[in-house]
Amino acid sequence: MVVANRLPVDFTVDDDGGVSWQRSPGGLVTALEPVMQKADGAWVGWSGAPDLAHEPFEADDMLLVPVTLSRSEIERYYEGFSNDTLWPLYHDVISPPTYHRQWWDAYRRVNQRFAEAAAAQAAEGGVVWVHDYQLQLVPKMLRDLRPDLRIGFFDHIPFPPVELFQQLPWRKQIVEGLLGADLVGFQRGGDASNFVRAVRRLTEHTTRGPIISITNEAGGPGRHVRAAAFPISIDSQRFDQLARQPEIQARAKEIRTDLGDPDVMMLGVDRLDYTKGIRHRIKAYGELLQDGRLDVEHATLVQVASPSRENVGAYQDLREHVEILVGRINGEFGELGHSAIHYLHHSYPAEEMAALYLAADVMLVTSLRDGMNLVAKEYIAARSDEQGVLVLSEFTGAADELAPGPLLVNPHDIDGMKDIIAAAATMDPREQRRRMRRLRRKVMADDVSKWSESFLGVLTAMPHRTTYV
Ligand code: F6P
């Protein structure tokens, strides 16, 4: 069973009250859907709409179990505590986190509801895999309800250093919540070590390397919890195959023609999120035009910024800043028939994304902090032609995995980033091939099904409820 904030479908309620659903986007869905279809399992999650109560139903060979959230719970648990407290705190406080007790109460209440829904569905002795920062209390709540279960947790975003984490007024409850799991997985080794340090600093439990020993205050048997890195991958075969299709290749050519056949097409693809370094990237690009190192007749930047968390103030501010910056650069440097930046505030299906990846000479991933960054991996998977250059921020989980191969940048260093972008724009095709081959060896071997198999393999091999003295 999977427990995640979102179900892999979005519901729409039409005017006459009828409910329909469609697949919802996002890396987690891509990562887990194939595993769940094979496992004949259930997926507990929120429908994405307020106040929508729905019976469990079958979709795409999975049993989907919707959890209902009221409008106020969406505001406090999802937009508030998850995305205006935890999200900025876990991403190096790029934006200041907000701490509200009412948000915390809603977070606890909603986590309890998810735990109860999972407890009601799970088979005796079953395996439950809980996902991400929205549900960090679920492992303990679920263990209290169903001690027979084997429970795994995977954190898709960074886990911060304890010096930042300890700002959180409810830091101990979050750590204890996670320790309800048998296995706590992270994107990078550094995230797992940050978590183990937080356990040492904030609790009485003892640790030995990646193993945390939980003492039972009632004097009963204790347990061991393992914290380890399981870097997530993508459905690499899907992007590889999509990009080999003649229609997608024709679409990639058409995109370049529509852009005025530039010598260099650069591409950024992100959720419109302040962690992604979109402003830093656009600033660097604008300065390259200003300095005359790039010009709009020969180069263009396509920035896909998909709408995200639009009710959260920091996201509204970011949108305004990005759009003002794009407008200014286009006004200053654009010419008839040659825009400096093509800014697209939309989401696109995988087919269009594959065509964009194939069309792009340079892929810019300049996050200020990113758990992994799957876009970087999708770009590589789509490039079976072994061309294209990946510019990748040092502050992504992907950089830990993929270097050497990408051109690494520190997005805070605008001058350094300008030099790297300029080098990417003029990289010799043989050097591109050498780097892309190396990147593809890694990405094509690491399919997402291997990621979930490896996590579930470790979880199910762990001795259950180990007794120790
Ligand atoms: O990266 C964390 C994550 O929660 C993903 O699982 C998800 O695809 C993405 O952020 C978008 O989040 P939201 O559910 O808030 O739209």
Image (cartoon, rainbow, N blue to C red):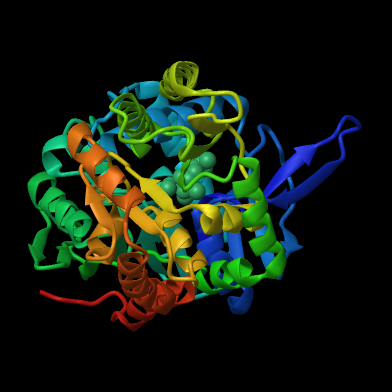
Q: Is residue 40 above or below residue 31?
A: below
Given residues 184 and 418, the one toward you in this image is 418
Given residues 143 and 308, the one toward you in this image is 308
Residue 119 appearing in the image: no
Left of 295 or right of it: where is 357? right
Residue at image point 37% right, 38% down: 276
- Residue 18 in the image, given as x and y percentages of width and height: 87, 40
Left of 215 or right of it: where is 435? right
Quarter holding the N terminus? Answer: bottom right
Residue at image point 42% right, 23% down: 318
Q: Is residue 36 above or below residue 191?
A: below
Given residues 337 and 448, the one toward you in this image is 337
Q: Is residue 103 above or below residue 231?
A: above
Figure quadrant of residue 41: bottom right
- Residue 88 in the image, given as x and y percentages of width and height: 31, 32
- Residue 60 in the image, given as x and y percentages of width and height: 72, 66
Quarter holding the C terminus? Answer: bottom left
